Image: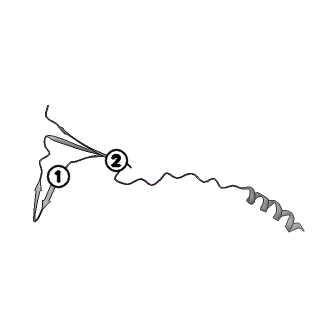
Amino acid sequence: MRQSIFLIPLVIFFSCNQSKKVPQEPERNKIEGTWKLVFNSVEENDSVTVKDLGNRDFIKIINESSFFIHQSDTEL
């Protein structure tokens, strides 16, 4: 009898306890964001050509539905 007196409130306590689940953000693609091109090489057949980016900036913006590439000259 004494065990049931302690067991009943314990069961009620745990049955009424609602776990609160925190909604998680959907997993983002690791490549999303803004990127600046700092090195450019082109591989054709058996050769590799390095492009000079000294006077140009290339920026690529990637999000979940689209991407944007912007080129600008750095000469004033």
Task: Give the vertical position of 2 relative to 71 (above or below).
Answer: below
Residue 54 figure quarter: top left
- Residue indicated by mark 2: 66
What segment is highlighted magenta in the picture? Answer: 22-33
The Cα atoms of the two marked residues, 2 and 1, are separated by 22 Å
Q: Amino acid at mark 1?
A: Asn
**Which of 39 and 2 lies nearest the eye of the viewer?**
39
Which percent across, then down, holds residue 49?
A: 10, 56
Residue at 57% x, 51% y: name it.
22
Q: How many marks?
A: 2
- Residue indicated by mark 1: 40
Residue at 83% x, 62% y: name it.
8
Which percent across, then down, holds residue 75?
A: 13, 34
- Mark 1 secondary-structure assignment: loop
Residue 10 figure quarter: bottom right
Quadrant location of the C terminus?
top left
